[in-house]
Amino acid sequence: MDIDIGIDKKDRKAIADGLSRLLADTYTLYLKTHNYHWNVTGPMFQTLHLMFMTQYTEMWNAVDLVAERIRTLGYPAPGTYKAFSALATIKEDESVPPAQQMIKNLVKGHEQVARTARSILPVVEKASDEPTADLLTQRLQLHEKTAWMLRSLLEKN
């Protein structure tokens, strides 16, 4: 059955493609954060272990929202490591970094997800796709705030 939600097929495809990149970046950052939760060590262990759990839990819930929006627009959501690897701009770690490097890597990751989300906004706005704009705004707020909180851990007093 054809989709007639007031957004033409070309724009729905462009938005779904952008959301697929956002989904891949978010899932990759989720996996990285979960890995860090499992493997963090050092004097900040308890703080970081709990913080990382809060962060990866939030992203786990977010990937479902992004994937469902892609489906709502009429396209399949990517859902394999191979697809995520091809779409994501965030790369996996080759080894387990020390805690301070984990924090730096996560700052970069959250900033990258924010940039990916922001890059989709022009086509979303052009298509008057308010539900996707709302989703992107929520994702931007979360990732920018999380990057700020992580950066704060790196400040020297």
Image: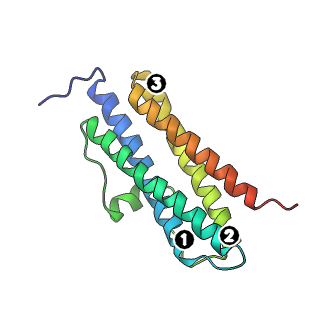
**Residue drawn at x 27%, y 36% as measured from the top left:** 72
**Residue drawn at x 51%, y 44% as measured from the top left:** 116
Q: Report x, y in % for residue 85.
A: 41, 62
Q: Report x, y in % for residue 153.
A: 74, 60
Question: Label 3 belongs to which residue?
Answer: 125
Amino acid type at circle 1 is His
Can the viewer see residue 96 in this picture? Answer: yes
Residue sitting nearer the eye, 127 or 44: 44
Question: Label 2 belongs to which residue?
Answer: 101
Q: Residues within 10 Å of mark 1 (few under 14, many from 20)?
A: many
Q: Earlier in the sequence, mark 2 or mark 3?
A: 2
Q: Quadrant of residue 17?
A: top left
**Residue drawn at x 58%, y 52% as measured from the top left:** 110
**Helix, strand or loop under label 1:** helix
Question: Label 1 belongs to which residue?
Answer: 37
Query: What is the CA distance from the residue labelled 3 to the residue labelled 1?
Result: 37 Å
Query: What is the CA distance from the residue labelled 2 to the residue labelled 3?
Result: 37 Å
In this picture, residue 12 sits left or right of residue 89: left
Q: Report x, y in % for residue 39.
A: 56, 78
Q: Are marks 3 and 1 in contact (CB under 8 Å)?
A: no
In this picture, residue 32 sits left or right of residue 79: right
Amino acid type at circle 2 is Gln
Q: Quadrant of the N terminus?
A: top left
Q: Earlier in the sequence, mark 1 or mark 2?
A: 1
**Helix, strand or loop under label 2:** helix
**Helix, strand or loop under label 3:** helix
Residue sitting nearer the eye, 92 or 102: 102
Q: Residue furthest left?
A: 1
Q: For the residues carrying marks 1 and 2, which lies nearer the camera in this image? A: 1
